[in-house]
């Protein structure tokens, strides 16, 4: 495991692009299904698209070999943590369900870059510098903050701990972390499977990041509402894609209609952070919302639902 540092490293990133009215108009004309190419900088039109709709999709940011290497790392980490009987990391619970063969299967990993030098290095790769420019200045990787580098494995089988995720914004989490008025946050995700609309996956309400505070709190019942919304869109991805979405948008993960390994959807969320340094450590208190969510999740696994 990497040793803690008193002063977290700040990663270099180019300046955020200057957006004009012409860029905004061009962004509004693009279809919501647009897949962008990640270059040395984020273009003004890409920035305008994010500001308008609350998300971006960049195609093939990781190579086929890099996708495979990450999955090998995650499989090795699962073997280690299941052998250790580990149930949480730095106060954040692991979501442990069952795979299609009935074996224990970790479906949500936390703080993975603290246990894998390969992942620790990957999220610092210079190709992600343009993405960091969207997050802000003086950006660092939050290896020890929030939930760290999270890896998700949504799976639709009896005994799954994580087949789907109900409507939510990340503003509620910020309130639990004592941030009175949640500000802009960007979720940076890497994707490891082909997921079309018909396969379930990420759903977003475009533009909902521009809602008011009360709408962010009460537009939908948090996490328990899984109903489709007439205004939602499916964010379709290929292995190696990178997505960015504003944490204030309403979003959910739709359960796959497939059963077994065909339903598997794997994503990794990179914690690029700019706010006050707040590291976690072994023995850290489990946040209330994680304690609350653990009860129905473990019951679902026990009952095989």
Image (cartoon, rainbow, N blue to C red):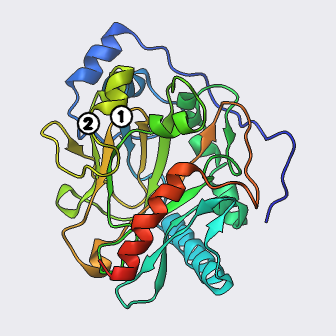
Q: Secondary structure at mark 1?
A: loop
Residue 33 rendering spot, x and y as whole percentages: 23, 41
- Going 60% across and 22% down the picture, which residue do you hit? 15
* Camera-nearest residue between 124 and 200: 200
Q: Which mark is residue 94?
A: none
The reply to whether discs 2 and 1 touch (Cβ–Cβ < 8 Å) is yes
Mark-to-mark CA distance, 2 and 1: 7 Å
Seen in the image, is 101 located left or right of residue 150? Answer: left
Residue 154 rendering spot, x and y as whole percentages: 37, 66
Q: Which mark is residue 205?
A: 2
* Camera-nearest residue between 70 and 7: 7
Of the image marks 2 and 1, the number of the one nearer the N terminus: 2
Residue lying at the far left in this picture: please name it.
230
Q: Which mark is residue 249?
A: 1
Neighbours of disc 1 within 10 Å: few (<14), some (14-19), many (20+): many
- Going 71% across and 37% down the picture, which residue do you hit? 11
Residue 266 rendering spot, x and y as whole percentages: 42, 65
């Amino acid at each position: 495991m990497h040793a803690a540092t008193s002063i977290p490293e700040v990663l270099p990133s180019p300046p955020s692009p200057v957006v004009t009215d012409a860029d905004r108009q061009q962004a509004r004309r693009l279809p919501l299904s647009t897949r962008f190419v990640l270059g040395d900088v984020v273009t003004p039109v890409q920035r305008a698209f994010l500001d308008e709709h609350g998300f971006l999709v960049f195609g093939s940011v990781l190579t086929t070999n890099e996708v495979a290497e990450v999955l090998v790392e995650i499989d090795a980490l699962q073997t280690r943590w299941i052998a250790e009987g580990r149930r949480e990391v730095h106060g954040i619970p692991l979501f442990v369900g069952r795979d299609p063969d009935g074996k224990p299967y970790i479906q949500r990993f936390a703080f993975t870059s603290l246990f894998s030098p390969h992942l620790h290095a990957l999220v610092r790769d210079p190709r992600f510098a343009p993405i960091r420019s969207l997050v802000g200045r003086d950006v660092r990787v939050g290896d020890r903050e929030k939930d760290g580098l999270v890896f998700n494995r949504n799976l639709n089988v009896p005994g799954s701990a994580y087949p789907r995720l109900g409507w939510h914004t990340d503003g509620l989490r910020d309130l639990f972390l004592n941030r009175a008025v949640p500000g802009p946050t960007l979720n940076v995700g890497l994707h490891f499977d082909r997921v079309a609309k018909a396969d379930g996956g990420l759903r977003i309400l475009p533009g909902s990041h521009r809602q008011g505070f009360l709408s962010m709190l009460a537009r939908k019942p948090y996490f328990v509402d899984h109903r489709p919304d007439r205004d939602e869109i499916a964010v379709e991805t290929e292995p190696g894609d990178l997505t960015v979405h504003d944490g204030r948008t309403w979003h959910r993960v739709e359960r796959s209609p497939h059963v077994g390994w065909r339903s598997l959807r794997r994503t990794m969320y990179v914690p690029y952070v700019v706010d006050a340094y707040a590291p976690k450590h072994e023995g850290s208190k489990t946040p209330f919302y994680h304690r609350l969510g653990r009860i129905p999740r473990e019951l679902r696994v026990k009952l095989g639902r």
